Image: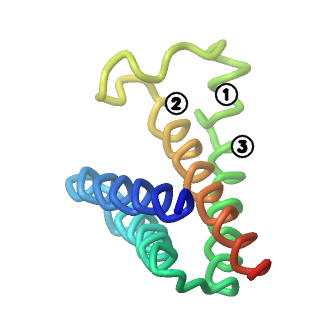
Amino acid sequence: MLLSILNSIFCIAFILFAYVNLNDKDSWLWVPIYMVASICCGFAIFNLFSPIVYLVAISFYLIYAIILFFAKDGVRDWIMKYRSPSLVESMQATKPYIEKTREFFGLLIISGALVINYFVAINL
């Protein structure tokens, strides 16, 4: 029951995240990223799990997160060079590190949701 509620929240949230990314310059990447996660969580609501899909998606998301971490004006620069200023002062990415850092944390959230479903799936 708790897992179904959690997956429902993730499913709806990821659909909304995909929607707000439709007007971005990199929507071709982020809409599918969020929609794959949403579909996985949506299937999990009905106890339809696919551990292989989870592993492939998690691998992609974490590799991309690592790339964003070490990219120029990425998470590492946000921490070391810019001294971790707020990322949520405004919705506009006015500083060079904001978008990459937000994307990094989004990928970690997606990965976390899929990791939960993966462990449930292999323990069924």
Colour style of the rendered protein structure: rainbow
Residue at the front extreme of this rendering: 1
Q: Residues within 10 Å of mark 3 (few under 14, many from 20)?
A: few
In the rendered view, tell whether residue 93 sits above or below residue 31. above
The residue type indicated by label 1 comes to Asp
Query: Would you say 98 lies left or right of 90 here?
Result: right
Q: Residue at x 24, y 57 (%)?
A: 19
SS assignment at label 1: helix
Q: Position of residue 115 (x, y in %)?
A: 69, 64
| Residue pointed to by mark 1 | 77
In the rendered view, tell whether residue 47 sits above or below residue 97. below
| Residue pointed to by mark 3 | 70
- Label 3, label 1: how far apart the Cα atoms are: 8 Å
The residue type indicated by label 3 comes to Phe
Q: Residue at x 61, y 74 (%)?
A: 57
| Residue pointed to by mark 2 | 97
